[in-house]
Image (cartoon, rainbow, N blue to C red):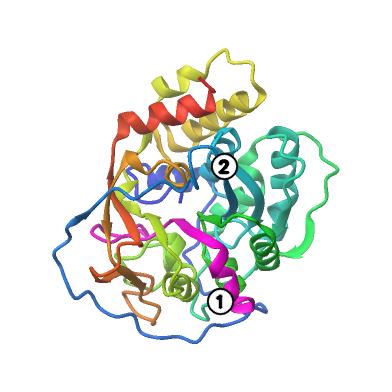
Amino acid sequence: MRFKNCLSFVLVLSVLLSVAACQPVANEKSTVIPSAQATSISDQSMPTAETPTSGMMDGSEKVPLIFSHDGAMDDIAALLYLSKNPDVEIIGVVNSYGEQVPATSSQKWLAYLHEVLDLDDVPLAVGSGAPLDPAGYAFPQGWRDAANDFWGLELPVSNATVDAREGYQLIIDLVNASPEKVTLLVTGAQTDVALALQHDPRIKENIRQIVIMGGAFHTVGNLNGGAGDANNDVAEWNIFVDALAAKQVFQSGIPLIIIPLDGSEDFWITKAIKDQLSGNQDKQVRFFSQLCDKEFELWGGDFLMWDILAAVAVTDHQYFSWENGNLDVISDIGDQHGQTVVVDRISRKNLFAVGNDYDELYNHILDVILER
């Protein structure tokens, strides 16, 4: 998630070059999952679910985590937060389809992972360069160009090597090798997770949960007219660009913890929050401060972050209010393509956030980043 659905949308797009309307992605080789129509909502009443239990195994063990992201600016913040979270062990990173072109941006992300965050032992693999959905779309080209360049942020030189495995294979290997159930955090398209489940369905037995930033359940989507000819006001970008992969993941039976627009569209970062980083000599905190400066520049003032909230939800669910149910994604072509829907209220293992405690959230995030 990134610049979408904000008052500064036009300003941001002008800064990030002239943005072309989204067009279907040219065919690149990838496995296609058979389509099926999503079941429509059967219950419009939305009772609030109980707060889900933490992703922690117990009070002492860390959560083994694979982070699949699409190169957004707030993915940079999310990975920094995760690297400093004492309850998380990052075991792998996948550069996935979305704002970035995974192969183009991977060397910069590897430099960030190894040289800035000092996560030298964490492998980074390149994910699929195309969606599974034959009707999939791409993000506007201006966003992709900026993401491929790591948003203009300066990085140290790195001689590290990108993992030779494809993104989905890294997921399979890490999940199968883990002695504890793994959590997946996906803040871009679901492409590589869907591919991993296709190639080795058994991995679901060793996945504790999939935490997702994406979707819009009770609120409007955030395509904002950027989806070409589609008259779509219900989809959110991360789900929309590969709705078929998202559908496969939603129907996998793996517990889902989702931070949709409903629970994240009000998390503004202000200069007062950024000022709390001033004077800190930790190199990661300094980098986060530089990231905030770049965001202020592009937004023309206060800015929104989404993906870092999904990173928080990996271990700390108490900052959100939740609803539950069996969930699905509409993948058929049309004005509802990519819409996330509640099928019924039976399941309590799938939850999506419908609100958050803003003050507690930003205090928690700063506490983790500043290690205070």
Q: Nearer the viewer, mark 2 or mark 1?
A: 2
Residue 164 falls left or right of residue 258: right
Quadrant for residue 44, please give it: bottom left
Q: Position of residue 355 (x, y in %)?
A: 27, 45
- The residue drawn where x is 63% and y is 46% is 90
Image vertical order of residue 368 relative to residue 134, above or below: above
Inspect the image, locate mark 1, and give the three-letter code of the amino acid beneath it.
Leu
Instruction: Using the rendered view, name the quadrant where residue 282 is placed.
Output: top right
Residue located 19% across and 76% down the image: 42
Which portion, as a residue range, is magenta? 197-224
Q: Earlier in the sequence, mark 2 or mark 1?
A: 2
Residue ID for mark 2: 62
Q: Are marks 2 and 1 in contact (CB under 8 Å)?
A: no
Name the spot of residue 324 as percent of width and height, x first. Answer: 28, 60
Q: Is residue 111 above or below residue 140?
A: above
Q: Residue furthest top?
A: 279
Q: Quadrant of residue 273?
A: top left
Q: Secondary structure at mark 1?
A: loop
Horizontally, residue 178 falls left or right of residue 47, namely right
Element at label 2? loop
In the depicted structure, whether residue 38 falls above or below residue 58: below
Check residue 204 for magenta coloring: yes
Going by the numbered disc 2, the residue's amino acid type is: Lys
Give the crowd class for mark 2: few <14, some 14-19, many >=20 residues within 10 Å: some
Q: Position of residue 140 (x, y in %)?
A: 51, 59
Picture layout, residue 335 above or below residue 302 = below
- 188, 226: nearer the viewer: 188
Which residue corresponds to mark 1? Answer: 132
Q: Answer with left or right where residue 331 lies relative to residue 75.
A: left
